[in-house]
Amino acid sequence: MKKDVLITIKGIQYQDDEPDTVELTTVGRFYKKDNSYYICYDESEATGFEGSKTTLKVEGEGKVTMLRRGGKNSSQLIIEKGARHQCLYDTEYGSLTLGVSGDRIISRLGDDGGDLNFRYTLDINASMATENEVIISVRECSRS
């Protein structure tokens, strides 16, 4: 069953050992299908992806697929612990292929929400670009 949830996202990007942190709180949907949890939300102007919808598919502690559709940018990033995937990232200036290497996935998601933390590195043409960490909290919206 799909639930309305409050989603808090903290993204940390490390470049040259300097952290750049962005935090966002939004409402979205959360549900379980087969053995995977799904976190869905609409992007806003604050994230730079206004008009896009982001869906995260969480397959235990082994794999997170982040799919962004609509708006000016589309992307699919596959973060799999101990694996490197080549993923397409569309921008308003054109498409690029990124290497995505999963370092860590910790999922404490349950049927009522929970927490998700994952780390990955991005590379362009096999040259490391950034290290990234995403911390997500999913809580049921309180009913008034």
Image (cartoon, rainbow, N blue to C red):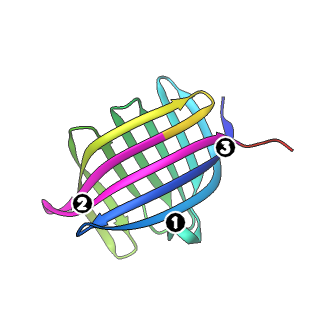
Question: Is residue 120 within the magenta segment?
Answer: yes
Screen quadrant of the N terminus? top right
The image shows residue 103, relative to residue 26, as above or below, that is above
Is 105 placed left or right of 34 in the picture? left
Please name the residue shown 40% across and 29% down the image.
60
Marks 3 and 1 sit apart, C-alpha to C-alpha, by 23 Å
Closer-to-camera residue (18/90)? 18
Mark 3 and mark 1 in contact? Answer it, CB < 8 Å.
no
Task: Report the residue marked by disc 1.
Answer: 71
The image shows residue 123, relative to residue 28, as above or below, that is below
Q: State which quadrant residue 81 falls in.
A: top left
Screen quadrant of the C terminus? top right
Is 81 placed left or right of 56 in the picture? left
Query: Element under label 1?
Result: loop
Nearer the viewer's eye, disc 2 or disc 3?
Answer: 3
**What is the three-letter code of the residue carrying label 1?**
Gly
**What is the three-letter code of the residue carrying label 3?**
Val
Query: Element under label 3?
Result: strand
Pointer 2 local density, CA inside 10 Å: few below 14, some 14–19, many at least 20: some
Question: Is residue 51 within the magenta segment?
Answer: no
Please name the residue shown 37% across and 31% down the image.
61
**What is the three-letter code of the residue carrying label 2?**
Thr
Task: Report the residue marked by disc 3.
Answer: 5
Q: Which residues are magenta?
A: 116-140
Closer-to-camera residue (11/86)? 11
Q: Residue furthest bottom?
A: 93
Task: Report the residue marked by disc 2.
Answer: 97
